[in-house]
Image: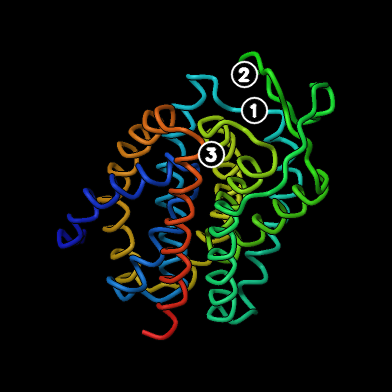
Amino acid sequence: MIEQTYWFMFPISILVATIAMTAGIGGAVLFSPLFFLFLNLKPDVAIGTGIFIEIFGFSSGFVGYARKKLIDYKLGKKILILAVPSAIIGVLLGKVIEPSILQLIFGIAIIILGISFIHKERQILVKDKRFHELHLKFGKLDRCYRIEHGKESIYLLSALGGLFIGLLSAGLGEINEYNFIKRIKLKGAVAAGTSVFIVIITALIASLSHFIYMYTHFSTSLLLEVLSIILFAAPGVIIGAQLGVQIAQRITTDTTKRFLFVLFTIIGILSIAKLVI
């Protein structure tokens, strides 16, 4: 029987999805601390529930960004080539590696990633647009920037993000935002839209393994509890995702960077805190 006590997940999910979709990150990275700290769900339950809810929100957000033509599919496909198999490997590794150790590493990494958004790097202005191999055709650009560390490291970080989404249902969207905004210098809305496209496909594939595990290992009562959370959260993330798409187009890239710094720092602290609480 569906538990009505989780009605509060509807308004909370609207807020979480709005924040996640505005930044182009996975909602699971915000839901997981909520489930661990306040709903007292076990790690595997929280991770599985988070990724299922995330899919609803990202599906809604994907439609919104696609309609406004704010997705670079060419870049997305390149990232998916490494992110998808990495996510599958992550799901498999998650069955044998201690989750608390991985969560600690993720918490520290996400804080470092957040700091990187406000760290100023030396930029080299390049007049020849052809030099910018990942240049987007979204409007006419007057200038572009050199990717100082090479595109190979971008793909490597994306593979790491895929591994994290398989292990913890979070990480790929956050790394995408770092790559797209800090390294490739995409506009905030385009970076978010492209990240949403990548994450939803990777999350869908990773969720298949999570679903099989949950169905074969969870008790009926626990499955009903998870279903209750999802039923109240799903409509909320669908609404919040559309709000996030609208907000993403109204804020500047610098604002997005500062927002991500604060958000990632909070997420990292919560990720570490839930290991000791």
* Mark 3 neighbour density, 10 Å: few (under 14) some (14–19) many (20 or more): many
Residue 189 x %, y %: 51, 31
C-beta proximity under 8 Å, tags 2 and 3: no
* Image point (53%, 39%), residue name: 196
**Residue named by callout 3:** 196
Name the amino acid, label 2.
Phe
Residue 187 x %, y %: 57, 31
Precedes in sequence: disc 2 or disc 3? 2
> For residue 194, which quarter of the picture?
top right
- Say whether residue 181 is left or right of residue 51: right
Residue 272 x %, y %: 47, 76
**Up/down of 89 relative to 139, above or below:** below
- Say whether residue 248 is left or right of residue 253: left
| Disc marking residue 72 | 1
Q: CA distance from mark 3 to mark 1?
A: 11 Å
- Say whether residue 16 is left or right of residue 67: left
Residue 182 x %, y %: 64, 44
User: Mark 2, mark 3: which one is toward the viewer?
Assistant: 2
Precedes in sequence: disc 3 or disc 1? 1
Which one is in front, 85 or 226? 85
Q: Residue furthest left?
A: 4
Name the amino acid, label 1.
Asp
> For residue 37, which quarter of the picture?
bottom left
Precedes in sequence: disc 1 or disc 2? 1
Name the amino acid, label 3.
Val
C-beta proximity under 8 Å, tags 1 and 2: yes
| Disc marking residue 110 | none
| Disc marking residue 138 | 2
- Assign a secondary structure to mark 2: loop
